[in-house]
Amino acid sequence: MLLLDSGRHVEAAGLVDEALEVAYPSIALVDLALVLLLLAREGEFAQLDEPIRASPWGMIAEALGRRDTAAALELLADTGARTHEAEVRLLHARELSDAGRHAEAAREAAAAAAFFRGARAERRSREVEILLQTG
């Protein structure tokens, strides 16, 4: 995600290609799914072997691959992966906002913002604040 944030999309895409070749059941699958989503390549997650997709982290990543951020959030809730949960919550807020569900989007974005502020992730906090302002 750092490469994407710095505008280095070609490099990010190359690393994603490599990651798809060596993926195994771990929290890194969620990172992979988030980057695939941001690159508009989310459908590629389905090419991974079924045992990888069926793992707990794989099920979260597969939900992201279907753009089902609500399901991904439900699955993430019990993992303790708060950073990932905040990132997915932010994606969910954007989807809700795009669908005109602004009150729900504001709640999700506020929850993500609270995490990012607590983690002192100032850049992410500012991004969420902008989302909340532009609604």
Image (cartoon, rainbow, N blue to C red):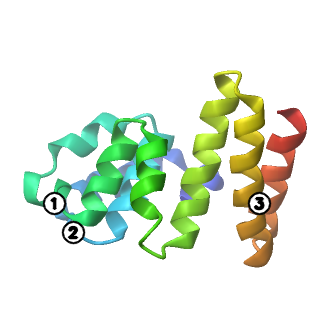
Snapshot quadrant of residue 131: top right
Could you classify mark 1 by the number of other residues whose Cα lies within 10 Å: few (under 14), some (14-19), or many (20 or more)?
Answer: some
Residue occupied by mark 2 = 25
- Foreground mark, 3 or 1, reads 3
Left-right relation of 44 to 131: left
Q: Is residue 61 above or below residue 40?
A: below
Q: Nearer the viewer, residue 68 or 103?
A: 103
Q: Amino acid at mark 2?
A: Pro
Q: Quadrant of the C terminus?
A: top right
Q: CA distance from mark 2 to mark 1?
A: 5 Å
- The mark tally for this picture is 3
Q: Is residue 71 above or below residue 2?
A: above
Q: Residue at x 80, y 61 (%)?
A: 125
Residue occupied by mark 1 = 52
Earlier along the polypeptide chain: callout 2 or callout 3? 2
Q: What SS does tag 2 mark?
A: loop
**In contact (CB < 8 Å): disc 2 and disc 1:** yes
Q: What SS does tag 1 mark?
A: helix
Residue 4 shows in the view:
no
Earlier along the polypeptide chain: callout 3 or callout 1? 1
Residue occupied by mark 3 = 113
Q: Amino acid at mark 1?
A: Ile
Left-right relation of 85 to 99: left
Q: Residue at x 44, y 62 (%)?
A: 76
Q: Residue at x 54, y 52 (%)?
A: 88
Residue 24 locus on image (x, y percent): 19, 68
Q: Amino acid at mark 3?
A: Ala
Q: Residue at x 52, y 46 (%)?
A: 9
Residue 14 shows in the view:
yes
Could you classify mark 3 by the number of other residues whose Cα lies within 10 Å: few (under 14), some (14-19), or many (20 or more)?
Answer: many
